[in-house]
């Protein structure tokens, strides 16, 4: 087989007129049947989440004592383990703190579940799980209600994402959408002001803040917001930065934008 014709096992094909057409996997196809959530804060949040299906609990004696002290309710007896076994099971680089849960992935929510929400963060093809997890953590800290992501070009649920989110994955509503522009229109229909972030915008985010429900829309690093996403937003604004750098990492930009949005919403209330 010629090198150019060699199939990539990670990219399934569909048959159309007898010809093989290669396509990237959808998020549903990439979604694992089970995953490991590890680390004290992610595990505590997962155990407290009624929507989370926990299949196994593995913990060292010290970690189990910490879970008990924190008031965690285990759905089944924990299997005693060792740090070395968890390293082998999850990976040597994982900071598991002696505890891990084998769980089923959460079912994604629909846009209409956000009718009562006041503050949401929309991610336009942000793919790095560390960045997405950090955004989730900041969103929870500033009282956001949900994260909206695309079904493609977004990280699947994983232990890495859960660890970076430090419990926010199981405490925030997570909405996955097929068409982001359509989802933004639906957010507008339920009362949200759509504010996109762009370091080259003409107005500041403070000046763009309006309404009693805010959706902050952030794009991927490098690419930023896609054109259709920008055009769908009510306003595209920048963060005021007097220093020599005009842009920030998406998770850092999210922190500042969430702080400004929270101050606006608290003032409006």
Image (cartoon, grey):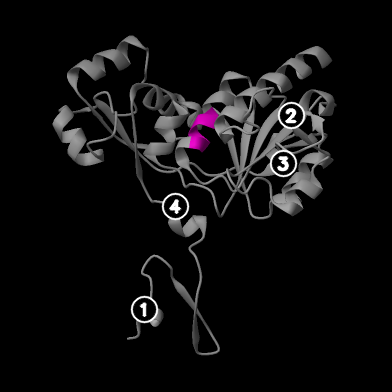
> Which of the two labelled residues, at mark 2 and mark 1, occupies the earlier sequence position?
1
Residues rendered magenta in the picture: 131-136
Q: From the image, tell me which residue sits under label 4.
A: 31
- How far is mark 1 from mark 3, CA to CA? 43 Å
Q: Are marks 4 and 1 in contact (CB under 8 Å)?
A: no
Instruction: Please identify the quarter of the rendering in which residue 162 is found.
Output: top left
Q: Which label sits on residue 178? A: none
Disc 4 to disc 3: CB gap under 8 Å: no
Which residue is depicted at the point 36% across and 46% down? 34
Q: Residue 24's spot in the image, x, y percent?
A: 49, 65
Disc 2 crowd, CA 10 A, few/some/many (<14, 14-19, 20+): few
The residue indicated by pointer 1 is 6
**Mark 2 and mark 1: span between their CA atoms?**
50 Å
Quick one: SS at disc 4?
loop
**First in sequence: mark 4 vs mark 2:** 4
- The answer to whether residue 92 is magenta is no
> Which residue position holds label 2?
116
SS label for mark 2: loop
């Amino acid at each position: 087989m010629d090198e150019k014709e060699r199939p990539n096992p990670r990219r399934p094909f569909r048959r159309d007129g007898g010809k093989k057409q290669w396509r990237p996997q959808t998020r549903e196809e990439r979604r694992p049947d089970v995953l490991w959530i590890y680390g004290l804060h992610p595990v505590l949040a997962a155990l407290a989440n009624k929507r989370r299906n926990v299949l196994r609990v593995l913990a060292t004696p010290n970690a189990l004592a910490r879970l008990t002290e924190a008031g965690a309710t285990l759905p089944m007896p924990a299997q005693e383990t060792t740090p070395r076994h968890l390293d082998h099971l999850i990976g040597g680089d994982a900071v598991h703190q002696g505890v891990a849960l084998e769980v089923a992935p959460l079912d994604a929510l629909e846009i209409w579940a956000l009718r009562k929400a006041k503050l949401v963060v929309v991610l336009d093809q942000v793919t790095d799980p560390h960045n997405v997890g950090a955004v989730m953590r900041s969103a929870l800290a500033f009282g956001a209600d949900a994260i909206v992501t695309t079904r493609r070009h977004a990280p699947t649920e994983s232990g890495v994402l859960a660890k970076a989110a430090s419990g926010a994955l199981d405490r925030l509503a997570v909405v996955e959408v097929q068409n982001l522009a359509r989802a933004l229109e639906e957010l507008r229909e339920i009362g949200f002001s759509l504010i996109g972030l762009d370091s080259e915008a003409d107005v500041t985010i403070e000046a763009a803040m309006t309404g009693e429900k805010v959706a902050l829309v952030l794009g991927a690093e490098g690419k930023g917001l896609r054109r259709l996403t920008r055009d769908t937003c009510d306003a595209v604004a920048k963060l005021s930065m007097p220093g020599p750098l005009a842009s920030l990492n998406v998770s850092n930009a999210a922190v500042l934008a969430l702080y400004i949005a929270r101050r606006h919403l608290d003032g409006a209330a």
